[in-house]
Amino acid sequence: MSLDVTGERAGTENAVVFTLKELLVDLATGDAAAPPAWESDWESQDDWNPPPSSASALLGTAVPHCAVLTLAGALSASATGMDAELRAEAVGPDRVLIAYQKRRFGLGLAGGDCAELCRQQGCEDRILDVKVPWCPAHLSALDLSSLVGAATAWAWTCHAPGEPETSSPGWPAEELMKAAVAAAAGEMVAEAIVTAAFDDPDEMEQRDVPAEYEDILRTRHAMDRERLRLWGMGRQEAQRLREAADGCVACHRALSWLDDGFAAGAYPGFRPRYCSATCDPLPPARERYREAEENRSAPRYESFPF
């Protein structure tokens, strides 16, 4: 069974289902062919050669080998391996959309790239990171349990035991802090990042090993430096949101940086588009986090691919 090349997203109920092994065999036995995006200009140039492609009977279009091999690599750690069940949700002249469980991928037919897409159904933007599998827009829509879980899982991959100076998380810390500040949860997410990215200095102190005394000081210093860096990101995002607003959403009072919470060196307990916690109807971050944890019917990190 093949999928029509319509250029439109196919409904999930009409998606073609096959295993990763079947897709690889299908591509290996298909005739050499040019994807629709390159049919008019598939000749080698002086400084460029088109990626090898084969006609796929499963997908109904020619697909670059490198795109499928990249997909196979992305799924190599899955428990099902070569038996991973895939769904071809849509095929267009430029891209094929393939889903595996909650993960979704876009296979580029022109350049042969393979990009993992946002977990939000219907969104075709790239994910921020394999541990933060959403685009920036939908990251902001997560409940706090999912947001803190994503921040923790990602920061843990940056953890370099015994080397606090190199444990400072890079991308996508800024996007995580933007989402956190917009939800009045900047301090919670920042602390989750710092705790996961560094060794625990309290635990090191309890071991009371003289050779580790210097490491304890270095770790605490690095953690404080990282907290300050994340706080600066949060303050910058809050300032951007407040400047874009005409006034407090609730009382319409002009928003001033003096009462945004950051001016006191802390994180505000209300969202940037409100003038105070009194005007913001959202419960405190810790209450929303506890509620989201209680409402989760699945294990906390079920949605993360590790």
Image (cartoon, grey):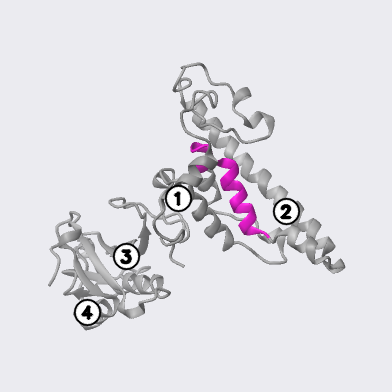
Residue denoted by label 2: 222
The amino acid marked with disc number 3 is Gln
Mark 3 or 4: the one toward you: 3
What is the spatial separation of the Cα atoms under label 1 and label 4, in whole angstroms?
A: 45 Å
Q: Tell me if mark 1 has few (under 14), some (14-19) or many (20+) residues whose alpha carbon lies within 10 angstroms of its own.
A: few
The amino acid marked with disc number 2 is Ala
Which circle's residue, 1 or 3, is located before the other in the chain?
3
Q: Give the SS element for disc 4.
A: helix
Residue denoted by label 1: 294
The amino acid marked with disc number 4 is Asp
Q: Give the SS element for disc 1.
A: helix
Residue denoted by label 3: 101
In the figure, residue 95 lies in which quadrant? bottom left
The amino acid marked with disc number 1 is Glu
Residue denoted by label 4: 26
Say whether marks 1 and 3 touch (CB < 8 Å).
no
Residue 286 placement (x, y as % from top left)? 54, 42
Highlighted magenta segment, given as a residue range: 179-198
